[in-house]
Structure formats: C-alpha cells, structure tokens
Image: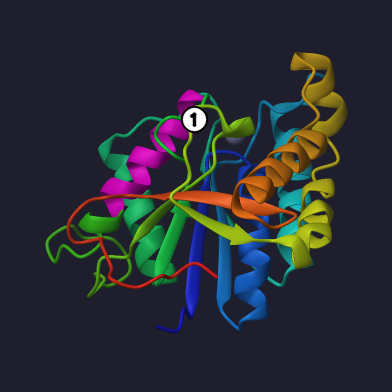
Amino acid sequence: MKVERVLAVGAHPDDVELGCGGTLALYRRMGADVVISSVSCGGKGSKELSKEETIKVRREESERAAGVIGATYICLGLMDSEIFEDLKNRAKMVELIRKVRPNLIITHSPSDYHADHRTTSVLVSHASYIATSFKFKTQSPSLPWVPPVYYMDNYLGVDFLPEEYVDITDVVDTKKEMVLQHKSQFPHLKERSGEDILEDMLILARLRGRQSGVKFAEGFRFFHSWPHVRTYRLLP
Ligand SMILES: [Zn+2]
C-alpha cells in the first residue's frame, strides 16, 4: 500500500525529530506528505526567556526542522507539563487527524518518561478512532478510515522493545540536521538535567541499528487495537 500522508505527533517541539526524524525523511523521499505536530508549543523550554518569547523561538526552530525534509509543522497550542485528555483537547486532536487525513500516525509510546508524552500517546490513540465518528463534530469532516498508530521509541530506549525497525543509515545526517534546528534546547537541557539530545539520539539509533543488522535504525511498536491492525507493513 502506498503511504501518501503521514502525521507525526509529539508532546513538545523536538520530540518527533528525535523519535522518528529518520523515518519521516524516508517517507518524504518516497513522495509522501509529512505533517509534524506538537501538542504543546514548548513555552516552558527556557529559563531566561518569557513564555511568549520561548514559544516564538521554538516555533521558528520547529518550522526550520520540518523544513529540512519539506514537512509542515502544526502546534496545537497547549502548554508543556499541562497536557491532559479532556474533551477540549480530544476535539483538538480529532480535528488535527481529520485535517491531515493520514494513512498512518506516529506518536509517543504510552510508557515513555514524561507525563506529557504518555498523555499525548493516549490522546492520539483515542482520537484516531473517534475521528471516524459522524456525531463527534469538529471543523473538518469525519475520517472514513481508522489510521494505524505507531509508537516511536522511548527516550534512550528505556522500557521499549521494538516490534519493527526502520533502517535510517542513509538519512541519519538529515535526522541530525533536524535535531540541530532546536538550538535553544541544547544549553537549556544540558543545564537542567545534563541531557545532550543529539548524543542520546545517536546512541539509540546505533543500538537499534546493532539490534537489526544495520548501522543506524529507529524502532517502533504498534497500537494493537481493532480496527487499527493491518496485514501489511506501512513503515519504510
Ligand atoms: Zn518531550
């Protein structure tokens, strides 16, 4: 089956690039349209800047990161550390899915470390089915199919056993380029928790590559729920 449109949803700006940037680059190479979305605009991602300034900087960074592969970026406008599944946010996610009309969706796994990541995972998997409902009204028309949902790897692979691997060796430099657009996060995360997101991304890509017999890979799990299941592979 030809994948024409892919929607990748992260909780924060930079999550999608880190979790599945290589796979998205491959989809673009195959001619698919890719939409990268973050549920929050990352307004708490700076110690020095105001919320408004931080959101502006991170939006520009996200647009540049998406631009590396010719993808579109959409922020759903929530605040980080304040993502909950309520009716309003469910409607926002349903509308995003209906607007993009993807053949498949990639999001966080429900076992990742951050509360926002876990809630985003639940929001997306629930909305992917509700998007077909005639009576759950949002701006766009309901979706005539239930898009399969793939979970991208957890941060540094903790508590995540991939079911499918994607060889990203050819596009690992593109993935690096995407991650590097999130310039504001490098000093911020280093100071806050000692994280080096680029280094951590490469460690995990190398590990998943070793596991699957290639140089660099990304790992995925699948949302095992009727009627999301398919008999064929959709990942590159
Ligand atoms: Zn995140």
Front residue of this view, candidates 21 and 128? 21
Identity of the residue furthest to the left in this view: 135
Q: Is residue 8 left or right of residue 134?
A: right
Q: Residue at x 33, y 39 (%)?
A: 122
Q: Is residue 120 magenta?
A: yes
Q: Residue at x 56, y 79 (%)?
A: 32
Q: Residue at x 61, y 46 (%)?
A: 211
Front residue of this view, candidates 220 and 8? 220
Colour basis: rainbow
Secondary structure at numbered mark 1: loop
Q: Is residue 40 left or right of residue 180?
A: left
Q: Quadrant of residue 134?
A: bottom left
State the image coordinates of residue 52 (x, y, percent, origin top left). Answer: 71, 34
Up the image or down, 42 lies above or below 82; here it is: below
Q: Is residue 126 left or right of residue 14?
A: left
State the image coordinates of residue 25 (x, y, percent, origin top left). Answer: 68, 67
Q: Amino acid at mark 1?
A: Asp
Q: Residue at x 42, y 30 (%)?
A: 111
**Segment tinted magenta in the rendering:** 114-127
State the image coordinates of residue 155 (x, y, percent, origin top left). Answer: 60, 32
